[in-house]
Image: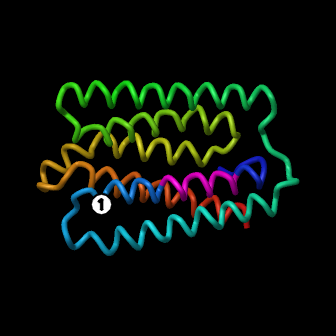
Amino acid sequence: MLADHLRDAAVTAAVFGFFASSWFGWAQEAPPPSWRKPLIAATVVSLLTAVAGGLLAWRHASAGTVFDDATSRTFGIVVGIEFAAAGVGAVILAVLRRRELIPVWIAFVVGVHLFPVAVIIHYPAVHVTAALITLASLVAVPVARSRSLPVSAVIGVATGAVLLAGALFSVAVTL
C-alpha cells in the first residue's frame, strides 16, 4: 500500500490536498445551510494538508522518484486523456442541459484515471482512492435525489473527503 519513494507520497499528499479543497469548494455551490461551516473547515484542512505535502516534497526533493522520461510521458498521456474526457463530457452535459451532472461526470473521470496513475507511480494506496471516488460518482445522483440535496454538494463532499483521506494517508506515509 506504500509508495516506492517518499517524494512521490509527499507530492501525492500535496496534489490530493489541493484537489480535496477544490471539491469541498464545489460542494459549497448550494449546500444545506448547516453544511457551510464544516465545508469551510474541510477546505482549510485540505489546503493545510496540501501545504504539508508540498513541504515534505521539498524536504525529500533529493530522494528518488518513479518519474523518468518514460513514466513522465505515460503520466502526461493519462492526465491528457483525463482532461479531454472530462472536458468533452462536461460540454455534452451542458448542451443537453444537464449541468447538475457535470461534477459527477468529472468525479467519475478522476476516479477512473487514478487507477493507471496508481500503477505509474507505484503507489497501491491510490487504487483505494480511485475506487472510492469512482463509487461515489456512481451513487451521488441517487443519494442526492433520495435526500433532496444538490448533486454538487453530495459529490463534492464525497470526493473531497476521499481525496483528503488519501492526502492525510500520504502525509503519514511520508512522515
Q: From the top left corner, tell me how far across and down residue 65 is, in percent.
A: 80, 44
Tell me what residue is drawn at x 28 percent, y 24 percent: 92
Q: Secondary structure at mark 1?
A: loop
Amino acid identity at mark 1: Gln
Q: Residue furthest right?
A: 62
Quick one: 128 or 58, which is closer to the camera? 58
Residue 83 as seen in the image, left or right of residue 120: left
Quick one: 57 or 90, which is closer to the camera? 90
Residue 95 as seen in the image, left or right of residue 89: left
Tell me what residue is drawn at x 14 percent, y 48 percent: 145
Colour mapping used in the image: rainbow
> Within the magenta stretch, is there residue 95?
no
Give neighbour class at mark 1: few <14, some 14-19, many 20+ (Cα, 10 Å): many
Q: From the top left corner, tell me how far across and down residue 86 is, in percent.
A: 41, 31
Q: Looking at the image, how many numbered discs can be counted on the residues?
A: 1
Tell me what residue is drawn at x 50 percent, y 48 percent: 129
Quick one: 33 or 94, which is closer to the camera? 94
Which quarter of the image is occupied by the C terminus? bottom right
Q: Give the quadrant of residue 72.
A: top right
Q: Give the quadrant of residue 135.
A: top left
Q: From the top left corner, tell me how far across and down residue 35 is, in percent.
A: 26, 69
Quick one: 162 or 31, which is closer to the camera? 31
Tell me what residue is drawn at x 19 percent, y 52 percent: 150
Dominant secondary structure of the magenta stretch?
A: helix
In this rendering, is residue 53 above or below 151? below
Q: Which residues are magenta?
A: 9-19
| Residue position for label 1 | 28
> Within the magenta stretch, is there residue 17?
yes
